[in-house]
Amino acid sequence: MSAQKTTPSEKSRPALRILQVIPDLETGGAERTTLDVAAAIQKSGGQAVVASSGGRLAGELEESGAVLEKLPAQSKNPLTVWRNVGRLKSIITKHQINLVHARSRAPAWSAYYAARQCHVPFIATYHGTYSAKSSAKRAYNAIMTKGAKTIANSHFIAEHIQQQHNLPAEQIVTIPRGTDFSNLNPNNLDQAETDSMRRSWGLSGDLRPIILLPGRLTRWKGQTVLIEAAAEIQKMGRKDFVCVLAGDAQGRTDYQDELKSLIARLGLEDHVHMVGHIDDMTTAYGLAQVVISASTRPEAFGRIAVEAQAMQKPVVVTDHGGARETVLDGKTGWRVPAGDPVAMAQAIDATLAMTPESRQKMGQTGRNHVLKTYSVNQMCAKTLAVYWGVLTHSAKG
């Protein structure tokens, strides 16, 4: 999928007054990308505005100089979606927005019509697979392809867009998710913070290898697969390990209770700890010997695998989606079939059986790989180039 063929020269670039629209700013890859791009817009001398219901990342957004305009962007209620058109038109006028960038389907419908009525360009980022089992659902998803450009956050997603919507390749710009590696460095680990987190996990003085699965507690993230893999690891005769599930339920208490029941039924209370949401992921990765992404559906990109590799940690991921691009099988980690706890157990056991020197070599290869390919600076530069290209083309039109 092509990048922009031409980028306006620095002197001819129009000022960026960009409105990004996203449901909320709680946690997740799309939300983090929104903040990173907003900060880059501010650094370029432009004005970044985000329309969202807000959330725990709102303060960080505003620290960059970006503006948060609150509206119920998370709602899928047709009446609310329609009313948001008028709200977004007011925001566009208030801030003299010259391009609208949608990052989720329901608010994209509002953003598309608001942009159209205000005569400003519209683009969207396709952040997920947005599976469609009916023509009606496919039509709903297609709003993400109605703009001047559609950004795909991986080659996997770019191919998915073409398959689902027959969108011409020249309309798609592939910009891999970018990661801020400034803090994701094993040299940044602080012993006091490491000890404190270990205590908070109930592992003070416990030197067993840690198998870390970060991710909100939702079924498709595959926590059950790792729990079942832990039982398989025990069957292999390995007893010296502990799995840490790091993520909150975000209201999914039934699933959280199901995980607890599965842990108890398999007799893994001493081997699987559920520790809730973690803000300090650098320290969390630092504590792990191996990091897991067990998603049973394809990840559009897979932020966890990239971050873990930046921290020089071997990873075990499911072999589909963006992971096929971000993880070099056998070199920076292992790719295993989705939903296969036996295969996952074998990969984890193989990783834990490696000598410290071999694990360090794999970790260093992983860090070199992701720093070269998936930096936040690259992502932001390419995104801003899309903005300038669309605005320049729009001005000529």
Image (cartoon, helix red, strand yellow):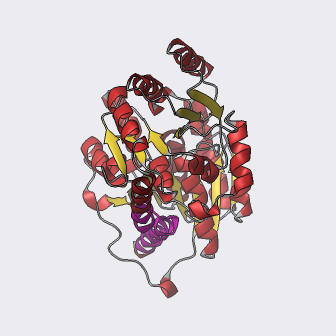
> Which x, y percent locates residue 130?
40, 37
Query: Eyeballing the image, is 359 above or below 291?
Result: below
On the image, the x and y values in percent for residue 358 come to 39, 55
Query: What main secondary structure does the magenta stretch of the protein show?
Result: helix
* Residue situated in front as seen by the camera: 298 or 362: 362
Figure quadrant of the C terminus:
bottom left
Residue occupying image coordinates x 43% and y 50%: 314
Give left or right: position of 33 versus 45: left
The quadrant in which residue 199 appears is: top right
In the picture, measured across the screen, residue 341 lies left or right of residue 289, that is: left
Residue 356 is left or right of residue 217, and the answer is: left
Range of magenta residues = 367-393
Q: Quadrant of the N terminus?
A: bottom left
Residue closest to the eye, 226 or 112? 226
Question: At 74% across and 53% down in the image, what residue appears?
Answer: 192
Would you say residue 380 sits in the magenta stretch?
yes
For image coordinates 61% across by 57% down, the residue present is 35
**Could you tell me if residue 130 is visible in this image?**
no
- The vertical placement of 215 against 356, above or below, is above
Horizontally, residue 188 falls left or right of residue 289, namely right
User: Is residue 93 one of those drawn in magenta?
Assistant: no
- Choose between 342 and 203: the one closer to the eye: 203
Most extreme residue toward the top is 265
* Identity of the residue drawn at 48% across and 71% down: 381
**Residue 51 screen position, x and y as percent:** 64, 50
* Residue 190 percent across, percent down from the top left: 69, 57
The total of numbered circles placed on residues is: 0
Q: Is residue 65 visible?
A: yes
